[in-house]
Amino acid sequence: MNKKLSKNRLREAFSEIKEATGGGGLTVSDAENVLDLSKRSVSLILSELVEEGLIVRTGRGTYAFSKKPTPLVSLETLPEDGKKIYLALEARGVQFALSCLDILADYTHLILRRYPHFCWVQTGSEDWAMEVIEESGFTPLRDPNRDQLNTALDLTRTNELTVIRKTTIFYAVDNGLASVERALVDLHYEVTRERYPLDATELMRIYYNVLTTVSLQYPKMLRYAGLRRFRSEIEWVLWKFKDRIDIPATYIKKPQSPNKFIRRLPNLDEVLR
């Protein structure tokens, strides 16, 4: 058996399990009986179903079916300017990933008329990507800080600024688009490090809207934050929301004392009032 199942086979396994169990609780034994596969194969399937957000782990060997839809990210879901940037970079063969508010625009609390686009590009291709973006009618800014972005926003009339940051990590990216999980983690980092002109209160509202609207792949979200070495901050956010949102207990871990970046975030009463 391959380490990763095809999407079709994974969905087939999911449908078989859900139909046989009635969509209620699920155990490893249930899955073994339904699929008639080895324990190792069933374990891999269940792990992938968790990764896909189709089921959630509720305890040791126990699972539940997700009641929220899986977030959809595609070219069609991008804002119009985001589509233009995407198509320009794709046509020129740049390895990239659009992230932050281009992915999360539907979850914002405020109507954001103007905001900087955010684009990861493969390390070493920054100049090329900036040239492509500029030719497309946008203004690229390489590794700007928040003050530089605010100044640039004051000098432009349209939604044309594009933040360019380099990376070698394209985890949780599909065809040039960050997943919702990655976009949340990216936006968290940018806002808490004061590198992006978005209020911390709006960041927390976006968290709330995403967590209450769609089924997140928490393992993917935490793993990506771990790759960027601030997993404990995302654990802190999930911990803070646990009494207001149904988050699987297996992903709730009492965090360490909040660091200086977490202390920049408002309390939830202020966010949700």
Image (cartoon, rainbow, N blue to C red):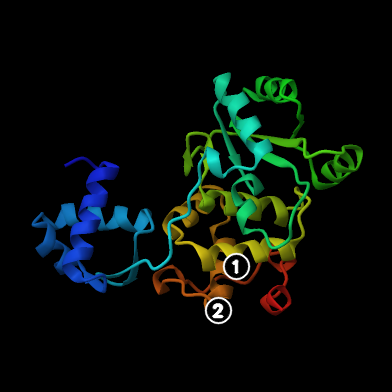
Q: Amino acid at mark 1?
A: Tyr
* Residue annotated with mark 1: 208
Q: Is residue 212 left or right of residue 190?
A: left
* Residue lying at 55% horizontally and 79% vertically, measured from the top left: 244
Q: Position of residue 53 (x, y in %)?
A: 38, 58
Q: Contact (CB < 8 A) between labels 1 and 2?
A: yes
* Residue annotated with mark 2: 244
Q: Is residue 162 left or right of residue 253?
A: right
Quarter-of-image position of residue 234? bottom right
Q: Position of residue 10 (x, y in %)?
A: 25, 49
Query: In this rendering, does residue 231 appear at all?
Result: yes
* Residue lying at 43% horizontally and 65% vertically, measured from the top left: 68
Q: Position of residue 30 (x, y in %)?
A: 15, 68
Q: Secondary structure at mark 2?
A: loop
In the picture, the disc for residue 76 is none
Q: Amino acid at mark 2?
A: Arg
Q: Which one is in front, 90 or 37?
A: 90
Q: Which one is in front, 227 or 56?
A: 56
* Residue lying at 42% horizontally and 57% vertically, measured from the top left: 219
The mark total stands at 2
Q: Is residue 255 left or right of residue 31?
A: right
Query: In this rendering, does residue 43 appear at all?
Result: no
Q: Is residue 66 above or below residue 148?
A: below
> Which numbered disc flags the more N-terminal residue, 1 or 2?
1
Mark 1–mark 2 Cα distance, whole angstroms, equals: 9 Å
